[in-house]
Structure formats: structure tokens, C-alpha cells
Image: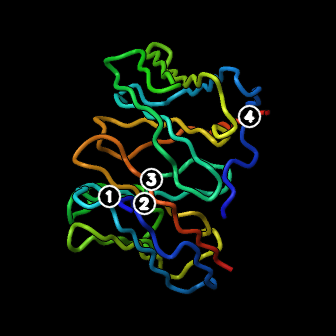
Amino acid sequence: GAGVSQTPSNKVTEKGKYVELRCDPISGHTALYWYRQSLGQGPEFLIYFQGTGAADDSGLPNDRFFAVRPEGSVSTLKIQRTERGDSAVYLCASSLTSGEQFFGPGTRLTVL
Amino acid sequence: GESVGLHLPTLSVQEGDNSIINCAYSNSASDYFIWYKQESGKGPQFIIDIRSNMDKRQGQRVTVLLNKTVKHLSLQIAATQPGDSAVYFCAESRSGNTPLVFGKGTRLSVIA
């Protein structure tokens, strides 16, 4: 398939642990976005990459959250010292230089 | 999978009837608007978009109406089918390649 893929689909971790969530965008898409969706809410923006650089990281809630996209394709969202409040579905989307954002299926993170 | 849309406003329609889902957006500077459909356990799926220089756009069985004066967006679905049952979100952005701001979702329930 040629859509956005995210791994793992589910991640259960303990409070205080470190987690990495991966996003593989659609080939050729230069823009990549991370969103977080809590139960019963719409997705909320975290960070946006244009190529390798973070064009806007204003949605990251605190310095425990970090994301990289070293080669302008795959991106990894990293969360340090996880807290129970970090539990949510983390969505990745990609797009060409402008226009429609295509979403992946998300990673459901549960922090016990 | 993750269940989205708990405690969201719900619209129940009879199969074959038309559905209208409304959304109020927040930023008068937004010039690009999108409707997404989200089924349980999946990422948002693009339905239709509209730019601010238009007030109506039609797709297959769907129509989006934009009223910039009152910052209101609506999605009309013709001949609603059981497969249309999902949570629907409107989203806004500036220039189409910036992070999306999602509105509160509406759960559409189609009664066969």
C-alpha cells in the first residue's frame, strides 16, 4: 500500500519510561505532521516538518516530547519520562508541498 | 481499536435521507477548510475541501458550504448510507500547508 504507515499500532508502557513512535509518510511527500488525539476529541497539532527541519513545533506540550526526521522521510516521535496523561492516539500525516494531508492509522499509546 | 467520538454530539439519520453536519471555525485568517471522516480505530480520512475564495464545492454525494461572514462550515451528505456512519471533523488552516486545527467532531449514526 502507498499510504502513511505508523508503528507500532499499540504501545503499552509504564510511567517514567521512554517511547519512540515511528511514521513512514507517503513517498515523495515533503511535509510531515504529528497530531495527538485524546478520547472523544479532535486531533491536536504537535509538530510539523518540511523536509528534514521542524517548521513548527509549537504544539509540543513540553520538553519531554521531541521529534526527528533526519533524511526527510521517516519520522520518529520520542517521549521521555512518560506520564499517564500522555496516553492518547498519536497520528501522523503527510502531504505534498501544499494541500491535502493524508493520515496514518495512528499509534495508541497507553501509559500505566 | 481506539474508540473515537465518545460523548460527541450525535446526528441520527434514516438510511437514504440527506445529512447535514455543521461546524463553527475559529480563525478568520483561515483560508483552507477540510472535512474528515474517522471510523473507530482508524485515522481521519479526507472527504472534501474548500478554499476561502469559494462558498460551495461539490463532490460525489457530498457538498461543503462555507459562510465566511459567520465563520460557519457545513457538510451535506446525500442519500446517507450505513457506511457513512462515523465521526466527522471539520478542520481549518492557513494556506493549505500549515497545521490543521480540528473542530469538535460529530458522530453520524445511520439507521437502516
Q: Distance between the residues labelled 2 and 3?
A: 10 Å
Residue placed most toward the observer, B68 or A58: B68
Question: Dot 4: within a 10 Å radius of its alpha carbon, few (fewer than 14), some, or many (20 or more) residues?
Answer: many
Mark whose residue sits in front, 3 or 1 = 1
Mark whose residue sits in front, 4 or 3 = 4
Residue A32 circle label = 1
Q: Name the image quarter holding residue B74.
A: top right
Q: Residue at left 77%, top 26%?
A: B14
Q: Residue at left 39%, top 58%?
A: A3
Which chain is mark 2 on?
A
Q: Which of marks 2 and 3 is nearer the N terminus?
A: 3
Which residue carries the number 3 mark? Answer: A45
* Whether marks 4 and 3 lie on the same chain: no
Q: How far apart are marks 4 and 2 (CA)?
A: 29 Å
Q: Is residue A62 above or below residue A96?
A: below
Residue B110 circle label = 4
**Residue type for callout 1:** Leu
Mark whose residue sits in front, 2 or 3 = 2
